[in-house]
Image (cartoon, rainbow, N blue to C red):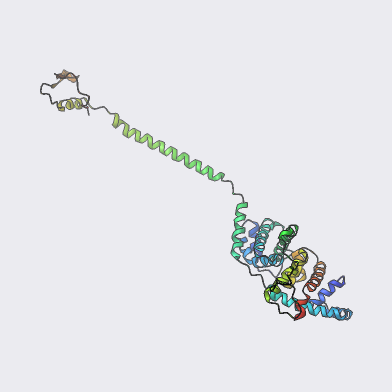
Amino acid sequence: MKNFEERYTAWLDGVLDESMQEEFEAMLDAQAHRDAAGWKKLRGLMRESLGPAATPHADFINSQVLAEIHRETPRPKRQESRGIFGIRLAWAGASLLALAIVLSAIILPQVTKPPTADQYISQVIEARSSDPTHSAVAFEAPGGKGAVLWVENAGYIPANEKIK
Amino acid sequence: MSSGELPDVGRLVERSREGDTHAFDQLITLHRERVYMVAYHILRNPDEALDVAQETFLRAWRNLARFDGTATLASWLSRIATNAAIDVVRKRQAHPETEFEVAPMAIDAASHTTPAQPARPGDSVDRAEIRERFERALATLSPEHRAVIVLKEMEDLSYQEIADSVGCSIGTVMSRLFYARKKLQTELKDLYEEL
């Protein structure tokens, strides 16, 4: 120890070597001994009065620190995720397109398929008119090459008569 | 890691360095009482001490690569906390309107009640007043002197631990203790002379 202050501190704290302690105490006057005794009383009072520092809301420290760390930590680039998402999107689109094609192939022909000639003639014949003077006769051409529908006393087929 | 540490602290430090926040969470739990204590004894304010404790662990997280294990983790954290608390004290001193009042208040001679005053010899002083007297006396010390006196007297750290915490030599710690004790004795002589 280099100076008086360091030796005095060590002596006061009781960590001075035994040989140095005797020598040092011999150097001190009565006032220094009284001061040392006074400090020991004050130290006891200080520890009693100020007490240990109990940590309030200790878990709060953890949560706040970790929240800040997560805010500071940059998120890893999601390049792989984007690639996988793109592939999945492409597959989904292709699947939808295939489904649309299949549905179109099945549904559309049924919607647009024209009725057979037999259907037309039979439908016309099945139509009823409230006017007794109206008549309709169907003739089939020889050889099945055509059919003639002879409608009498009906200037037109009403628009509300749908050919189903 | 230095001897005397819990055996798994070294592993926790390594995992924390790799970015494992769960491991760091455990380190916080192990050391938060000590860190808070250091901050509180210097600042004497629980809210500021909590802020400093959080700041301490954040600084530790950011600088884990610099922790080389020559001192214990506890000492390293104490040092960070001490520096952070001293920074707060210096900011307080730079703004005197927020400084803890240390000057005795004037007493109206006709007043029947008195604010807290230095006790006269022979008067009994209750615990709250004693505490306040200590708070005021500690506030008169520089942040560096306050740090060494509270770490020594309140937490009974060794000179080496204090030196590691405040970042100075053992000789400097001992000199600061000498002057801090002398000053407190001068401020509070009447208190211990009653005993």
Q: Viewer-proximal residue, B164 or B72?
A: B164
Image quarter of residue A15: bottom right
**Residue B59 against residue B150 in the figure, above or below:** above
For this orientation, the residue located farthest to the left is A132
x 77%, y 64%: residue: B144
Report the quarter where the N terminus of chain A lies: bottom right
The answer to whether residue A134 is left or right of residue A75 is left
Report the quarter where the C terminus of chain A lies: top left
* Observer able to see residue B87: no
Image quarter of residue A9: bottom right
x 86%, y 81%: residue: A30
**Residue A152 against residue B110 in the figure, above or below:** above
* Observer able to see residue B176: yes
**Residue B91 against residue A22 in the figure, above or below:** above
x 77%, y 74%: residue: B188
How many numbered callouts? 0
Q: Viewer-proximal residue, B100 or A39?
A: B100
x 83%, y 80%: residue: A33
* Coordinates of residue A113 in the picture (x, y in percent): 28, 28
For this orientation, the residue located farthest to the right is A27
* Coordinates of residue A159 in the picture (x, y in percent): 22, 24
The answer to whether residue A10 is left or right of residue A124 is right
